[in-house]
Image (tube, rainbow, N blue to C red):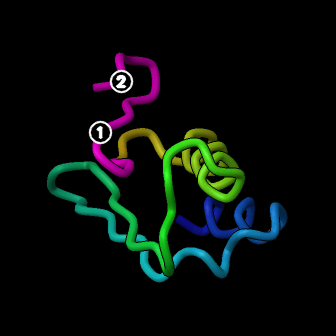
Amino acid sequence: MISFARLAALAGVADSVEEVFCDSKACICSFKFSGDIALGDPVERKLFAAAKETIDHFDWLDWSHFRGGEDE
């Protein structure tokens, strides 16, 4: 999560994230965003890039991402 926060800050979009929750038993992270984040907008793309680079398995908007696997 710290690596994600660092990349989001470097991209100038850290203020769009209210919370990152990682469930250690399920090995999945989820995000709570401040304001409206829409799939494909510039802020969402920067946040997704940071998450994809630093977190193996996470829920993103209405789907899940698995590093090294398929997106659902």
x, y percentage for residue 10? 84, 65
Q: Is residue 37 left or right of residue 25?
A: right
Rate crowding at label 2 as few (under 14), some (14 to 19) or many (20 or more) other CA atoms within 10 Å. few
Q: Position of residue 68 (x, y in %)?
A: 45, 19
Count the labels in the image: 2
The three-letter code of the residue at mark 2 reads Asp
* Front-most of residues 46 and 9: 46
Per the image, label 1 sits on a secondary structure element best described as: strand
Locate residue 44 relative to residue 33 in the image: left or right: right
The reply to whether the magenta stretch includes residue 27 is: no
Please, what secondary structure does the residue beneath circle 2 have? loop
Tag of residue 41:
none
- Mark 1 crowd level (few <14, some 14–19, many ≥20, 10 Å Cα): few
Number of the label disc, if any, that sits on residue 71? 2
State yes or no: residue 65 in magenta: yes
Real-space Cα separation, disc 2 to disc 1, in angstroms: 7 Å
Q: Which residue is mark 1?
A: 63
Give how far across and how far down residue 21 sits, in percent: 34, 70
Q: Label 1 is placed on what type of residue?
A: Trp
Q: Which quarter of the rendering shows the C terminus?
A: top left
Question: What residue appears at the point 39 percent right and 65 percent down from the top-left corner?
Answer: 31
- Give the quarter of the image for residue 69: top left
Q: N-terminal of the two: label 2 or label 1? A: 1
Q: Nearer the viewer, residue 55 or 36?
A: 36
Q: At 36% across and 24% down in the image, what residue appears?
A: 71
- In the image, residue 34 sits, relative to residue 55, either above or below, namely below
From what the image shows, is residue 33 above or below residue 30? below
Q: Does the residue at mark 2 contact the one at mark 1 (Cβ under 8 Å)?
A: yes
Q: Residue at x 59, y 42 (%)?
A: 40
Task: Give the magenta range.
Answer: 59-72
